[in-house]
Image: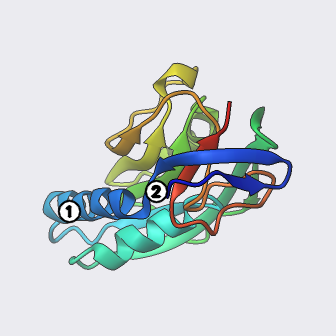
Amino acid sequence: MSQTIQVLDKHFVPFLDASTIQTKVQELANQLAADYQNKKPLFLCILNGAFMFASDVFKALPIDAEICFIKLASYKGTKSTGNVITSIGLDVSLTNRHVIVIEDIIDTGKTLHSFLPQIHNQQPASVAIAVLLHKPEATTYEVPIDYCCFTIPNKFVVGYGLDYDGFGRNLSAIYQLAE
């Protein structure tokens, strides 16, 4: 993982290798299994970015659970637009369910801050947030993060589901924008 890569017009350098990511994903799955034993949680994956993370967590989970998907977006290029768009809605009831929101990255926090009231309005038994990456330096909207794999600096990253204008999601490692 020592090479610089190019995605569209930008160059990226290695940041987190695939094996480091998978180790953290397994640790997270183990913790979730312990915390949600016999609760049959419902995982709510935020598309598009969290699909790889959610898939790997779900595969590593040794307990009964369900998963569904919702599409929320606030990014264009390398910057958040500040507007959250719901383009694929929730099609299952959350009432009395233990809901675990799976998100790829929390930077400003606006996406989840805007979406969490919709979840709480459905009166779930509990709501937890599991995130692959958190950028505390960029956070302007407080979001209660219950599970976090990596805290990272305020740098733009691609790979493992994260994209730059739709590209780079297919990389098994995570790369950060070259200076």
Q: Residue 93: in sight, yes or no?
A: no
Residue 166 in the image: above or below residue 127: below
Are the two marked residues, 1 and 2, in contact with CB atoms closer than 8 angstroms?
Answer: no
Give the crowd class for mark 1: few <14, some 14-19, many >=20 residues within 10 Å. some
Kindly identify which residue carries mark 2. Answer: 102
Q: Residue at x 39, y 76 (%)?
A: 66
Please name whichever residue, 74 or 165, is drawn nearer the observer in this view of the structure.
165
Q: Which labelled disc corresponds to residue 178?
A: none
Give the percent coordinates (x, y) of residue 150.
38, 42
Residue 162 in the image: above or below residue 10: below
* Amino acid at circle 2: Ile
Kindly identify which residue carries mark 1. Answer: 36
* Amino acid at circle 1: Tyr
Q: Is residue 137 left or right of residue 12?
A: left
Q: Residue at x 68, y 63 (%)?
A: 89
Q: Is residue 163 left or right of residue 103?
A: right
Q: Nearer the viewer, mark 1 or mark 2?
A: 2
Mark 1: secondary structure: loop
Give the percent coordinates (x, y) of residue 26.
26, 65
Give the percent coordinates (x, y) of residue 136.
47, 25
Q: Residue 25: in sight, yes or no?
A: yes
Q: Is residue 72 left or right of residue 94?
A: right
Q: Residue at x 49, y 58 (%)?
A: 1
Please name whichever residue, 64 or 177, is drawn nearer the observer in this view of the structure.
177
Mark 2: secondary structure: strand
Q: Give whichever of discs 1 and 2 has the lower sequence position.
A: 1
Give the crowd class for mark 2: few <14, some 14-19, many >=20 residues within 10 Å. many
Distance of mark 1 from mark 2, alpha carbons?
Answer: 15 Å
